[in-house]
Amino acid sequence: MKRRRITAALCGAFAIAALAACGTSSTGGKGQQESVSAAAGAAKEEEAVRDELVFVNYRDIRDLNPHLYAGEMYAQSILYDTLVSNTEDGYVGCLAKDWTISEDGRVYTFHIREGVQFSDGTPCDANAILANFNAILENRERHTWLEMMNLLVGVSAPDPNTFVIEMSEPYYPMLTELACIRPFAMISPECMIDGSTKNGVNGYIGTGPYVLTDFVTDEYAVFERNENYWGEAPAIQKITVKVIPDNQTRILALEKGEIDLIFGKNMLDADAISQYTDREEFTVGISAPTSTRHIVLNTTHEILKDADVRKALQHATNRQVISEGIFYGLEPAAETLYAPTVPYCDVKLEPYAYSAEEAGRLLDEAGWVMGRGNIREKDGRRLELDLLYNSDSVTEKTISEYLQSEYLKLGISLNIHGEEEQSYRDNMKAGNFDMVFNICWGMPYDPQSSLAAMRAPVYGDYAAQQGLEDKAEIDEAITRILTSTDEAERQELYEFVLTRLHEDAVYLPLTYETNKALYTSGLHGVHFGTDQYDVDFASMYFE
């Protein structure tokens, strides 16, 4: 066990946690201690309002360097601030109080909020922001999944209150990506190692409302309110995050009053949610769809290169049964790659309705007829496919076993196997799969960032699409989407791309994932934001 106490020696001061959405106001009363006199005349302190929140996560906070991708995002989002924030009401200023965009859409000029300091006392001015961008750009290749990194020409700080970004082309998702904690959160330059962050940092110092004061690896982390925060102070003074890997143990801890809040799409299963919907002492929250749980079909595979086989699998998959039988309806059945609630994705596409008859017809027409052992064959080859899943996901294993049973009824032999997360991801990225589980990236990365990443071997999408005849057309349209300044043209291009991917049947959507929360009813202000990975502690309070 590794224990660290955060002291002034660590990068000069306590580390800070930023608002999940900067610029939002806290609500509710602040925790306080009231002193009352006892009848005997002795002084007695009484806590009028609770000012400590006990949160839970399934693993440790890990490396919270905001310019890399290893740390827990909920922790990074309460440690660091970005130039702007993406809210339900649109973009709002954070470290930048406002900004202007040139007429050609290529130059962004940010006016930096004055008087903001990192918790080590370093000014968070344009020069500090320039130092952060220089550190990010030093590791540019790591961040090219964001298209803005490919279009960015230069950054500068003409004076301490002005920061400028120049692009080679206009880029409509620019502010959306700048609002992403990773990699665009600002860390104190004093925490950089020789001006660099790509090989690590020597502390986690930000500009937000909380400071990280203590953590024990794989046990807990403690964040305390920054009394010198530049914005409105949050109501809750202290956040303690406990590490509890097991679902059932987390539930028992909530029951015993040891924790106050469980939050996250993978932190609660459907059984747990269903048990608490009618309990007065607890509150259940379910968000709108955040991302799509789906299976990627490798179009370079000898069998799956046939679009009719891919379409047969679409019709052979009963999404409603998966939604209701495995997720109790908490994850709605998905008919398309992106939910219609995602910007630009309310496209009229004809769903692949569940029909064993239609699936069988398509396989027959493709030349796959029933053979030995009730497995279809064609030219002496059996209709056998392999489905790869993340062995750390109980849900993916359950879905795999269900599909294995259902497909067998149609004469499809589905071999399923799970691998630990890193191996699973490595094989997906390399295209070493017939079929593989995946999810869309969710807000704020859908649809623009996840589509842009299909053009390069970022995840399994690029490899899986190599067998598509219209791959080049799809990629070209995605590129045009990102640089288009015409809203109508952009919508038309999105419709083209989403229609092609749907008709190519390269993605087999299963359910729309939802974010989930379960918490003690005395806690208020819990809500789901525009970023599915944020937990907006700054809006929470006890009554």
Image (cartoon, grey):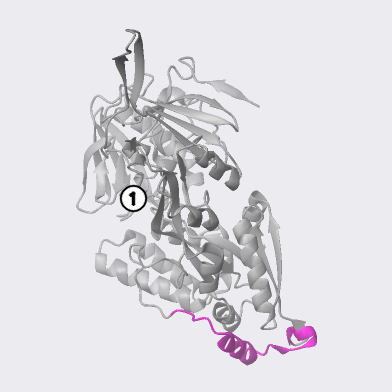
Q: Secondary structure at mark 1?
A: helix
Q: Residue at x 32, y 7 (%)?
A: 41
Residue 295 sits above or below residue 358 on the image: above
The one nearer the camera, 110 or 446, is 446
Residue 541 sits above or below residue 440 on the image: above
| Three-letter code for the amino acid on which mark 1 is drawn | Thr
Residue 185 spot, x, y in % from top left: 39, 37
Q: Which residue is mark 1?
A: 176
Q: Is residue 163 magenta?
A: no
Residue 115 found in image quarter: top left
- Whether residue 269 sits left or right of residue 89 in the image: it is right
Residue 137 spot, x, y in % from top left: 44, 39
Stretch of the chain drawn in magenta: 351-378
Image quadrant in which the C terminus is located: top left
Q: Neighbour class for label 1 at 10 Å: few (<14), some, many (≥20)?
A: some
Residue 479 found in image quarter: bottom left
